[in-house]
Image (cartoon, coloured by chain):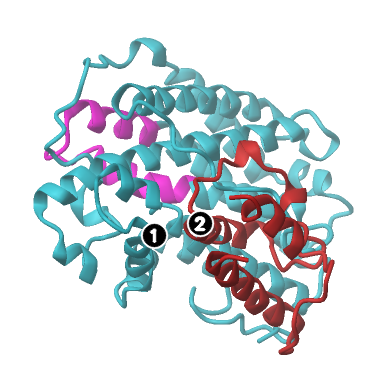
Amino acid sequence: MTATYASVRERLDQDPGFRDVLKRLVDLSERDYYNPYREFQWPDSLPEQRWWMTPEMMVEHGTAVGATLSEQQLQTISRWESINFYSLNVHGIRELLHEIIARIHTTDFVAPSAYFHHIIGEENEHMWFFAEFCLRYGGKIYPSRAMSLAGPGVAEADHFLVFSRLLIFEELVDVFNQRMGQDERLDPTIRKVNEVHHRDESRHIAFGRQIVAMLWSDLRDRIDQSQQAVLEAYIKRYMIASIDSLVDPLIYKDAGIPDPYEVRRQVLADPSHPAYVERILKRSISFMTNTGVFTSPLFEEPRRAGAAS
Amino acid sequence: MSNGFDVVAENLRTRYQKVQGNGEQIPPGYDLIENRVLDSLGFVEFILLLEEHSGREISIDSVSREDFRTVESIRKRFFDGV
């Protein structure tokens, strides 16, 4: 269990369990392949005065600001919040594709490269139907707010961080997809987009969990406790920032809500918000804890020796 | 100098003090990116603050990291001549 490997390639190549998982995922991708361009009906418009998101999943749910808004206002917000949600998917998939393409058929990633082809193909198709939804029913894709600046500054952690970010992003989205794909209050087109995405993402998440756990078990032997604490703190910040990006002032602006920046600030500062973050990220937090990446709850400092306060 | 810029400058000073662990002012020409005062994860919140207080929407496609390199470059790009 505690074997030390000379390289990431060796770690990924020599695990028979990983090889079995990869083979099974490739088989499933081939078996379940579909043509996304013919999968959806795309009606000309969707009813505006209806829920576009599951109301209990909206970030305003349970907040003081949310309580001041009428159902009609919340439904209008749900429309733009869903356009923002799918826009975030478009931008997130762009990052995912960029990172996977940078690794496919390189020395470290010989073992998973056959499956990378399926991920790239499937994610390209997801990006297409999310963009299609935004453009047809919102008239736009909300712009990305992200800029690539410094990360946590731990040498050797690059692969681990990339696949961790991708996994957290996919699991976060999947929590919404699972719920909204089944919610009868939503239009059938909205349910279908979420349901189809959930079907494919379950494979990507299974892969993500495998590779993140393996990369962590390899990395933790190479870095000290204080570096592990830096990575833990960074991933926690990434999780919280990901949830915060679900709410953007542009949503409130488009929904006709006055003072959109202040509304966002109040939603994020609401006493109920940390519980919302933990509820949405429950699976990811459990995974990071069980894998040994997290040594403390999401909103607490790492409990590793040498952890910065 | 506008009041909007004062709010942004104060936010940067708070970030700087957190990174440095002291209560000093940001030195002129200090590199906010190199020194991780602005990092990837904190950037979204900063850009929203900048939008709110400069009074204009900021498209990431139309800015570069050099616009955020120093306090002076931020003022020049987003506040001067507005």
Rendered position, B38 above or below B24 = above
Q: Nearer the viewer, residue A123 or A34?
A: A123
Say which amino acid is labelled 1: Tyr
Quadrant where the N terminus of chain A lies?
bottom right
Secondary structure beneath dot 1 equals: helix
- Percent across and percent down for residue A98 are 67, 33
Q: Is residue A253 visible?
A: yes
**Chain letter, colour red:** B
Q: Colour of chain A?
A: cyan
Q: Give the chain of mark 1.
A: A
- Percent across and percent down for residue B54 are 53, 56
Label 2 environment density (alpha carbons within 10 Å; few <14, some 14–19, many ≥20): some
Whether residue A182 is in magenta: the answer is yes
According to the image, label 1 marks what residue? Answer: A261
Q: Main secondary structure of the magenta part?
A: helix
Residue at 46 percent across and 22 percent down: it is A128
Q: Nearer the viewer, residue A258 or A185?
A: A258
Secondary structure beneath dot 2 equals: helix
Magenta span of residues: A170-199
